[in-house]
Image (spheres, rainbow, N blue to C red):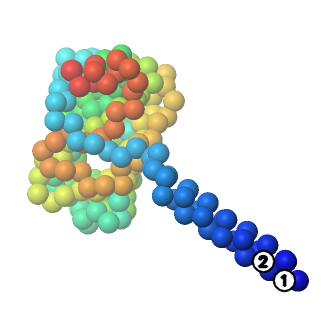
Amino acid sequence: MMKAVSFLLHLSFLFLFLFTFAQGSSRSIIPQPQPLTSFNINKTQNAGSCSYTVSIQTSCSSPRYTRDQISIAFGDAYGNQVYAPRIDDPYSRTFESCSTDTFKISGPCTYQICYVYLYRSGYDGWKTEAVTIYGHYTKAVTFYYNSFIPNGVWYGFNQCNGAAASSASSM
């Protein structure tokens, strides 16, 4: 009986050590949105050859509504960029807290979407939960923000590899 208790005690210390070690060395693999101060919009590319559906979920911890101006830009690793200068409409109750708004946006055809940035200009504030982009020739992709969009800066994700990071910031 004493051997069994001693064995269980040692086993529990071993699990406690392993759990503590695993917690201390772990890091989040979920990407977080980042500000991008050198982002340039390529306004000449919006020829409108392809249609995209963009679904934006506003957080329940966002202000009740926002009158801020909201823009979106997204694209692929090859320099194809879709830009919508204003997707907000405070008169139609766009971006109210706990809501999901869907937009049809036209732009150049892209390969797989790997970056998205939102731009907010105003004083109300706005917290985005997630942005999902559906394209005719691409797989749907969701970017999880769960954060307030800062005022006056492009804010989002660039999950492109290699040349994509440089092409997205040099547009």
User: In this orientation, does residue 10 appear?
Assistant: yes
Q: Is residue 33 left or right of residue 22?
A: left
Q: Return the residue nearer the eye: 7 or 64.
A: 7
Q: Residue at x 45, y 46 (%)?
A: 30
Q: Is residue 150 above or below residue 160?
A: below
Q: Residue at the location (88% across, 83% down)? A: 1
Mark 2 surroundings: few (<14), some (14-19) or many (≥20) residues within 10 A: few
Q: Is residue 106 above or below residue 117?
A: above
Q: Is residue 150 shown left or right of residue 31?
A: left
Badge 1 crowding class, 10 Å Cα cut-off, few under 14, some 14 to 19, many 20 or more, is: few
Please report contact status of discs 1 and 2: CB closer than 8 Å, yes or no.
Answer: yes
Mark 2 highlights which residue?
A: 6
- Closer to the camera, 18 or 88? 18
Residue type, numbered disc 2: Ser
Residue 66 on image: x %, y %: 20, 58
Q: Quadrant of residue 131?
A: top left
Residue 27 as seen in the image, left or right of residue 167: right
Residue 116 in picture, x, y percent from top left: 33, 35
Kindly identify which residue carries mark 1.
2
**Residue 87 can be seen, yes or no:** no
User: Where is residue 112 shown, x and y percent of the image?
Assistant: 45, 24
The residue drawn where x is 38% and y is 39% is 54
Please tell me which residue is depicted at 16% across the width and 42% down the height of the picture.
153
Label 1 and label 2: CA atoms lie apart by 6 Å
Disc 1 secondary structure class: helix
- Specify the amino acid type for callout 1: Met
